[in-house]
Amino acid sequence: MSLSPRVSACSRACSISWRYYQGRGIHVAARIGTEAAGGEILISSETVAGTAGRFSVGDLRSVSLKGIEQPIELGRIDSR
């Protein structure tokens, strides 16, 4: 059996309560992860802006995420 993890990143604020991360940023990152295909890394446009060109990112696409009022722009990190 092979595994194909899905990865997401979001640069929104979160907080730590005891040993757990919580907050809107965690919620948004989890929703972005549901949009990723196996082996794909998706990041929010906020995170793209914060990486200062460290990664090759494909074209941004706008997606509507469950529980998030406004669509969010996502980019795919190119692994090649």
Image (tube, rainbow, N blue to C red):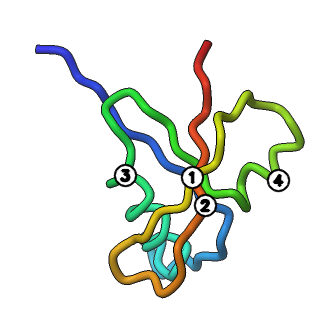
Query: Which of these two is toward me, 31 or 19?
Result: 31
Quadrant of the frame with the N terminus: top left
Secondary structure beneath dot 3 equals helix
| Residue that carries the numbered disc 4 in the rendered image | 50
Q: Is 10 in front, or is 70?
A: 70
Classify 10 Å Cα crowding around label 2: few (below 14), some (14-19), many (20 and above).
some
Label 4 or label 2, whichever comes before in sequence order:
4
The answer to whether residue 53 is left or right of residue 34 is right
Q: Distance between the residues labelled 3 and 4?
A: 21 Å
Which tag is nearer the camera, tag 3 or tag 4? 3
Query: Mark 4 to mark 1: distance in Å?
Result: 17 Å
Q: Is residue 60 above or below residue 64?
A: above
Asked if disc 1 and disc 3 are in contact, CB closer than 8 Å, the reply is no
According to the picture, the residue beneath numbered tag 1 turns out to be 61
Vertical side of 11 occupied by 6: above or below? above
Which mark, by number, is residue 35? 3
The three-letter code of the residue at mark 3 reads: Glu
